[in-house]
Image (cartoon, grey):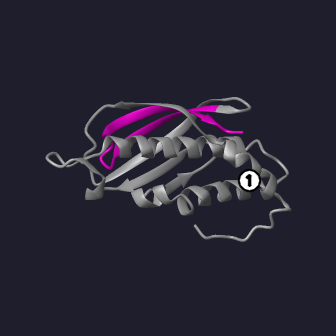
Amino acid sequence: MTQHTIDTTVPLTTAQLAEHVTQLFSEHMPFNQLLGLKINKLSQDEVEIRLPWDKKLMGNPIHKILHGGVTAAILDTVGGLMAILYAVKEIDNVTLEEFQKTLPNVGTIDMRVDYLRPGKGTEFIATAQVIRKGKKVAVCRMELHNEAGTHIAFGTGTYMIS
């Protein structure tokens, strides 16, 4: 995604806000870049993030499986991004300056991860959908599969969105 200069005092469309949030997650969060997370599919109803296998992300060198912390991190990232994008679709006629004032309040409140199988594969695909959204909190369901479709883990996350 390319970086655009946005006038922070002009009201933005929902699509422009979504683009801004996506850039924050993909280009301005060093941890996401360190892991190698790539936002692949993006809509206001579903997000998909891909992570190519890298031996630096290994949790078990004997079996060569993905570290459980990496699994949790990708699930948290896809859930948080989904929660924010879902909330953005209800925002109308707000400037970037006003929107950025709400961002410090955005974050993970709680998350549960269920590890179903060892994280083996050449690529890992995380998806998320909103289960429920209120004015301040959203709950998401996240899943992690490998390139063959093997279900590795799922999570449920609660996110502060305003």
Q: What's drawn in magenta, residue-wise? A: 138-162
Q: How many marks?
A: 1
Residue at (32% x, 40% y) in the render: 68
Q: Is residue 152 in the magenta section?
A: yes
| Between 61 and 79, the one nearer to me in the picture | 61
Percent x, y for residue 57? 30, 53
Which residue, as the protein is rendered here, is positioned at the far left? 62
Please, what is the dominant secondary structure of the magenta stretch? strand
Tell me if 107 is positioned left or right of 54 in this view.
Answer: right
Check disc 1 and report the residue beneath it. 100
Residue at (69% x, 70% y) in the render: 4
Percent x, y for residue 40? 49, 56
Percent x, y for residue 50? 42, 53
Residue 159 is at least partly visible in this image: yes
Which secondary structure, mark 1? helix
Residue 38 is at least partly visible in this image: no
Tell me if 132 is positioned left or right of 57 in this view.
Answer: right
Percent x, y for residue 36? 41, 59
Q: Quadrant of the N terminus?
A: bottom right
Q: Quadrant of the C terminus?
A: top right
Kindly identify the amino acid type of the residue bearing the numbered disc 1: Gln
Q: Is residue 96 in the magenta section?
A: no
